[in-house]
Image (spheres, rainbow, N blue to C red):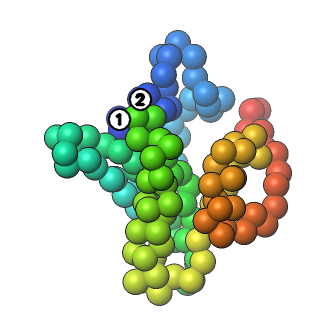
Amino acid sequence: MINELFPDVYQRDETQSFFKDQSSSEARKRYYEELGDFFVFRDESCGNRVMGMAAGTILDWSSYNFRNIAIHPDYQNLGLYPLFFDLLAEIMKSYGLKRIEGDVAPSNQHHLHVLNGMGCVVSSLGHASRAL
């Protein structure tokens, strides 16, 4: 679904991939089909064009993990991310969730800056490699 919504973000050059793991494992597919929540933000003034999207899953009885939140490049730097995040937080709150978490690459300084400006707490920085 992500590649369908945002080829500009996730696969600008089809000959070069940003992701080391190119396999779409059956377990991952089932995981998102059964547990994943997908949120799509659309621009009605432009024929319902996708402006942003988020994907996440419930972690436990009070926590939610956003695995991906992205804004289409044409809509970046317009102050939409905090609005989308606040809307998502309200949805989570309406279901009784009290905490939102997610992972941001330490190299994504812009995203960390935006989250800090929104009052989010960075609880750790780390590095992971899934290359086998």
Of residues 37 and 81, the one nearer the viewer is 81
Considering the image in quadrants, where does the C terminus appear? top right
Which residue does the image show at 81% across and 45% down from the upper left? 127
Instruction: Find numbered disc 2 in the image and state the secondary structure of the residue it sits on.
Output: helix
Q: Please provide percent x and percent y for residue 112.
A: 69, 53
> Residue at point 45% right, 35% down?
73
Q: How many marks?
A: 2
| Mark 1 residue crowding within 10 angstroms, few (<14) / some (14–19) / many (20+) | few
Q: Position of residue 93 (x, y in %)?
A: 46, 82
Q: Residue furthest front?
A: 78
* Residue 56 appears in the figure: no
Q: Depth check: 22 or 51 in front? A: 51
Question: Please, what is the three-letter code of the amino acid marked with disc 2?
Answer: Pro
**Residue drawn where x is 41% and y is 29% of the image:** 7
Answer yes or no: do the residues labelled 2 and 1 have beta carbons within 8 Å? yes
Residue 32 horizontal side relative to residue 116, left or right = left
Does the rendering let one see residue 117?
A: yes
Horizontal side, residue 131 vs residue 69: left or right: right
Q: Amino acid at mark 1?
A: Glu
131 left or right, relative to 15: right
Instruction: Indicate the position of residue 40 as horizontal and vertical percent values.
Output: 34, 53
Asked which secondary structure carries label 1, the reply is: helix
Query: On the image, numbered disc 1 is attached to which residue?
Result: 4
Q: Eyeballing the image, is 94 above or below 3?
A: below
Give me the C-alpha separation between circle 2 and circle 1.
6 Å
In the rendered image, residue 92, in percent from the top left (x then y), is placed at 45, 76
Q: Is residue 88 above or below residue 115?
A: below
Mark linked to residue 7: 2
> Crowdedness of circle 2 by 10 Å Cα count: few (<14), some, many (20+)?
few
The outermost residue toward the bottom is 96
Image quarter in which the N terminus is found: top left
